[in-house]
Amino acid sequence: MSGNVSVPIVIIGAGQAGLSVAYYLRRFDLVAGRDFIIFDRGPDTGGAWQHRWQALQLGSAHRVNDLPGMKELGLSFDTADRNLPARDVVADYYREYEQHFELKVVRPVTVTSVLSTPPHLVVETSSAIFGDQKTDADLIVNATGTWGAPFVPHYPGAGTFAGTQVHTANYVSSEAFAGQRVVVVGGGTSAIGFLLELEGVASTLTWVSRRPIDFSHTDELAEVTAVAAVMKQDRAARAGRALPSIVSGTGVPVTRRIAAGIDRGILVARPMFASIEPTGVRWSDGTFTGADVIVWASGFRPELRHLGPLKLREKAGGVSVGSGASGTDSRVFFAGYGPQASTIGANRAGRSIARQLMAKL
Ligand SMILES: Cc1cc2nc3c(=O)[nH]c(=O)nc-3n(C[C@H](O)[C@H](O)[C@H](O)COP(=O)(O)OP(=O)(O)OC[C@H]3O[C@@H](n4cnc5c(N)ncnc54)[C@H](O)[C@@H]3O)c2cc1C
């Protein structure tokens, strides 16, 4: 006996994906705290949403899908006030959800590493409140999302920049950049959201993207490309390759707000700069644009550092995951990874993973 707390299933992360798995485990009559434990490092409910910037309203995010069973509480993001900050609405709804379904999320607890001591997995955690602890588990579900692993591509001179560099993960509000010359990097909806917020606030705005922006104009096309993008993610996950960017597969759906931004000339992206200098960016033709701020809306990577000791990383650069199950270690599941990385994908994953867990208990 190790003397550690022991539980059949540990879920790491209480965002959409982790909560969805927990909901389906409850439907199988499993009890939180006895049959499974959810650890989350966030101080509050809402998963990554609790950290998103104030100005991101529910109406300007992509569609946020309801958690399974949320109707039972009379809640739906579809009928929520679209002008409210998305982070507040999601945190409030998830709080009610966790209480209603008695999910007993243990927070703030950071999973620092997961080790294999067959037949168990040992989940090591650290918390200002609970201290350092170890939990033996038969199975784990990793549902840690991407928010904690911001990605910034390398450009020569980045370290010499004398102004401010901020990533989506640390962006607070446009007011911080009032009157400043801002360069926004990225080809997705976060970059577009920042540009629209900064219009009229920054003194100059420059948008750059590594690939041309693929604005998609019809819902039908958006649906077809979204399915293709999910399949592309699935192929990469099954093959253990690093995941391709979602936006490279789906394009950017043109809402009325975005169409108006294009018409005003705000949403016109240039190809990437060649290098960064202390006071601005240098283009490949040798010309220069002065900048005080670079906003990196350049995406995130799956957060998997704590799984390092399990040696799941493949030579191809990613982890091998098919239908939410690790292809390398049959005790490990991934919820919200790759093809499941959206609020709708995370929901579907919940049911499928819960069924697979039940089959193994
Ligand atoms: C800027 C941005 C905007 C987005 N907008 C949308 C949108 O509008 N619609 C949409 O469908 N999707 C959107 N997404 C995709 C988004 O990832 C999903 O909506 C959803 O948040 C994913 O849920 P998740 O549970 O997988 O991850 P998360 O919501 O990130 O939850 C992961 C949880 O794991 C916890 N965690 C992480 N590491 C540890 C650890 N080591 N120990 C303990 N806990 C840990 C975190 O605290 C967090 O609570 C967006 C993503 C980004 C980055």
Image (cartoon, grey):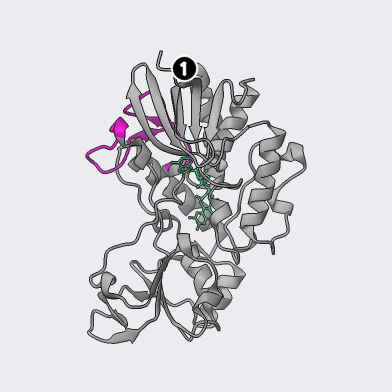
Q: Is residue 288 highlighted in magenta?
A: no
Above or below 35: residue 40: below
State the residue position of label 1: 360
Q: Is residue 330 highlighted in magenta?
A: yes
Q: Position of residue 345 (x, y in %)?
A: 52, 42
**Residue at mark 1: C-beta within 8 A of ligand 1:** no
Give the magenta range.
Answer: 309-337
Q: In this view, does 106 lie to the left or right of 299?
A: right
Kindly report the secondary structure that dominates the magenta region of the rendered protein. loop
Front residue of 135 and 338: 135
Front residue of 75 and 53: 53
Above or below 235: residue 282: below
What residue type is disc 1 on? Lys
Q: Residue at x 54, y 26 (%)?
A: 354
Q: In this view, does 203 lie to the left or right of 313?
A: right
Q: Where is residue 126 in the image (x, y as percent from the top left)?
A: 45, 38
Above or below 269: residue 167: above
Above or below 150: residue 4: above
Q: Position of residue 17 (x, y in %)?
A: 53, 39
Q: In this view, does 337 lie to the left or right of 91?
A: left
Q: Where is residue 248 in the image (x, y as percent from the top left)?
A: 39, 58
Count neighbours of disc 1 (C-alpha within 10 A) and say few if under 14, some if 14 to 19, many if 20 or more.
few
Q: Which residue is drawn at 29% across and 80% down?
A: 278
